[in-house]
Image (cartoon, rainbow, N blue to C red):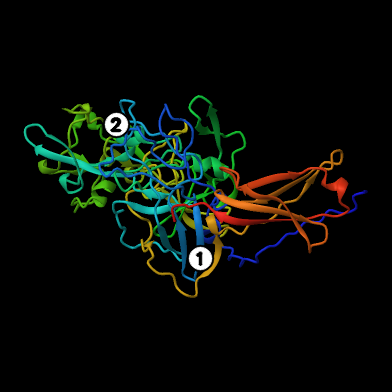
Amino acid sequence: MKFKKLLLILLLACPLVAEANPIITSWYTKQSGVYARVIQSSAITTPKTTWPDAGVTNNNTGGAAQTLPVYADVQRIRYTTTDVYINANGLASYTMGPWFTNSGGLFGFWPLSRDYQVRITRTPAPAATKTRHPGGMIGMMVNGVAIYDLGDAFSFHQTANSPSVTGTDGMGATGDGWWSRDALAVEVVTFDPGFAHQPGNNGQYHFHAEPKALRYQLGDNMKATYNASTNTNTYTEDITNLHHSPILGWAYDGYPIYGPYGYTTAMNAASGISRMRTGFVLRNGQNGTQDLRSTGRVTMAKWAAATFGISNPTNVNPVVLPATQYGPTTTYQTTGPGGTTTYSLGRYCGDYDFLGDLGQTQGVGFDLDQYNGRTCVTPDFPLGTYAYFVSIDASGNTAFPHMLGKQYYGTPNAGNATTIPTNAIETFNGGPNTQETMLPLVTNPTTGNVAITWSSVEGGTYKVEASNNLQNWTTLNASVQGAANTTQTSITENGATIANPKRFYRATRTATATYDP
């Protein structure tokens, strides 16, 4: 029988069109229907949707584990005229892990699903008085993963200040607060290839610096090299076709966070693309700085003094400290259960100076201010905005302050939203709530086979049917499982175009496997 026509049933919901506002449209949602996955160790390299496996070292005192699959990335977006509301589970759709310690052992904390319902303002404004970041979450990546401050909540605690400073780093209130530790200096060994990790029992997967794997997913001048033996990617810069970075996330003051590349001239979109140069330099005797290796940590950089509440009545740089606020020398060492620790230059935020405080001009010798941003035009804001940029050096390595400085540029007024206004407009509802759609059919003129493909949800079970008249339906397969780690599923009906003059298809989700809600 000659095949005349092959029709496709395409039932589409009619979603509301989001306003053309980047804080509404920039969220990463196309993988929301796949499960989050981790690689657990160098021995267990198959990505798992629940973790840890029995026998895998887990140093969580609470024994925290992900016992049910959880959907990745941003799950839902709603907005009002003043705010955007984001629901996410806090886990990425790229494969996370593994995480290791300094000695190469398995880092014993596991990422766990969250229940984020975050509100971020749509009308950010510069703050007259800048606010230091609190501990924990200070923003959200566009894939729903938490953003943390550049610090790690530790600071040096003196046990003696004369004649030589002694002590150790203490967490939170057990530290003195003046010499606040740079997270990258001590924690980077616990980051996974995507450049994130999680603290203790709360399992809050988060970034302190550039999100390498997310940058790759978003096409931000990043390439991936796959290692088959470890089932992991190594991410490196790709400057062969340099273009402006996309929005990677949003800070809790409502300003966007871009990748490391922007327009060379801040307010000129025709000026070419350049790496955004941080304004911070080590206090190593270069660029007009003191050399803390010879002077000791007896002064504080002006920007850090203002941030950490150190008195500077004469507005000088650097600020001379009282002995009770001295830090350890850069050769000072302590020995503990983890071995010997050297408090070398770069360990603390106060080990860096800001070039603007040293007489240099932003836009000439450096691009980013002390909050790690600038006022500029971008592809998303052609009329201009204030924007943060992640900072890397010329070799592609993260550079202090990594993502945001220690203070917000604007007024932070975002965070957890316990309720959503009744007038909020929904522009996306994904994950297990995804509305599936049929994709174009693919026919083989030789065999008459028809490949039927639809957008699917991992964990979904589908019934696929065919009809010649839209009235009588024949089940082709009653239990097709949604394809793993992808948002499309396909089956083939053999000889369909040979046996039928016309053919209609439909796929219906009949069940969804149990998941972490």
Residue 227 shows in the view: yes
Residue on which the image places disc 2: 284
- Disc sitting over residue 78 in the figure: 1
Residue 457 shows in the view: no
The residue positioned farthest toward the right in the image shown: 2
- The amino acid at mark 1 is Arg
Vertical arrangement, residue 80 with respect to residue 344, above or below: below
Q: Is residue 346 left or right of residue 485?
A: left
Identify the residue shown where x is 23% and y is 42%: 154
- Disc sitting over residue 428 in the figure: none
Q: State if disc 2 and disc 1 touch (CB < 8 Å).
A: no
Vertical arrangement, residue 17 with respect to residue 297, above or below: below
Q: How dense is the environment of label 2, judged by Cα within 10 Å: few (below 14), some, or many (20 and up)? A: some
Identify the residue shown where x is 31% and y is 28%: 102
Identify the residue shown where x is 83% and y is 53%: 6
Residue 231 at x, y = what percent? 50, 30
| Sequence-wise first label, 1 or 2 | 1
Q: How dense is the environment of label 1, judged by Cα within 10 Å: few (below 14), some, or many (20 and up)? A: many
Q: Secondary structure at mark 1?
A: strand
Asked where in the image residue 185 lies, by quadrant, the reply is top left
- The amino acid at mark 2 is Asn
Which of these two is toward me, 88 or 127? 88
Q: Secondary structure at mark 2?
A: loop
Q: Is residue 122 left or right of residue 204?
A: right
Q: Is residue 300 left or right of residue 437?
A: left
